[in-house]
Amino acid sequence: MEPAMTSEQAAKILNAVAKMEARDWIAFGALIVAFITFLIKARVDGRIARHRETIGFLEKKTKDLSAEWKALQTMPPGAEADEAASALFGMLDTVALLIKKRAFDGELIYNYWWKYFYSPLYEPNVSKWIERVRAKDKTTLEHYCNLHNKWRPRIERELGVRPAAPPRQQ
């Protein structure tokens, strides 16, 4: 295997750097400043885009999510409830994944939807459904459960109460 750079090539590069004049160093410094500015701007633009996408998603889905959750709470256990729970928690699991992948702003989701990542695991029918689904496949709702575990201490601290522990989700 040949080396990436021979000693002759390295010597040429060092000679070129040594021969650089003040104006060359100024131009090199300007390039570095431009590159750092580009990186900062890209990061800020990404944060703004994530914020906008999250707000757009919340505006579209909040009303539907609330209706789906209320309907699920009143449904008797059965195939229809399983299908409704699967749709609702599948969407919440996707949101949790998008937060993890930094496509959504986690703080905005927390401020609007914290109760959907906390309360359902304390509903007996829902927690039994989640247990049953996760018993078949541990990766099902993995992101949802991870986000619940991450946010639970904060939610309980803000509520000022610590309810009974939900079923273990591992």
Image (cartoon, grey):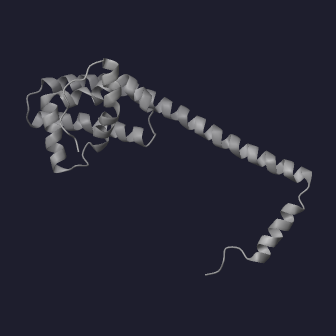
Looking at the image, which is closer to me, 40 or 90?
Answer: 40
Q: Is residue 74 visible?
A: yes
State whether residue 142 is above or below residue 126: below
Q: Residue at x 65, y 80 (%)?
A: 2
Q: Which residue appears farthest toward the top when viewing the image? A: 160
Q: Residue at x 14, y 37 (%)?
A: 129
Q: Quadrant of residue 60?
A: top left
Left or right of 125 in this view: 70: right
Looking at the image, which is closer to me, 111 or 56?
Answer: 111
Q: Quadrant of residue 5?
A: bottom right
* Residue 146, position as x, y percentages in the image: 31, 40
Q: Quadrant of residue 153?
A: top left
* Residue 51, position as x, y percentages in the image: 49, 30
Q: Which residue appears farthest toward the bottom when viewing the image? A: 1
Placement of the C terminus among the 4 image quadrants: top left
Count numbered badges in the picture.
0
Left or right of 159 in this view: 59: right
* Residue 33, position as x, y percentages in the image: 75, 43
State whether residue 82 is above or below residue 22: above
Left or right of 52 in this view: 23: right
Left or right of 52 in this view: 14: right
Q: Residue at x 45, y 32 (%)?
A: 105
Placement of the N terminus among the 4 image quadrants: bottom right
Q: Residue at x 77, y 48 (%)?
A: 31
State whether residue 111 is above or below residue 98: above
* Residue 68, position as x, y percentages in the image: 23, 26
Q: Is residue 62 visible?
A: no
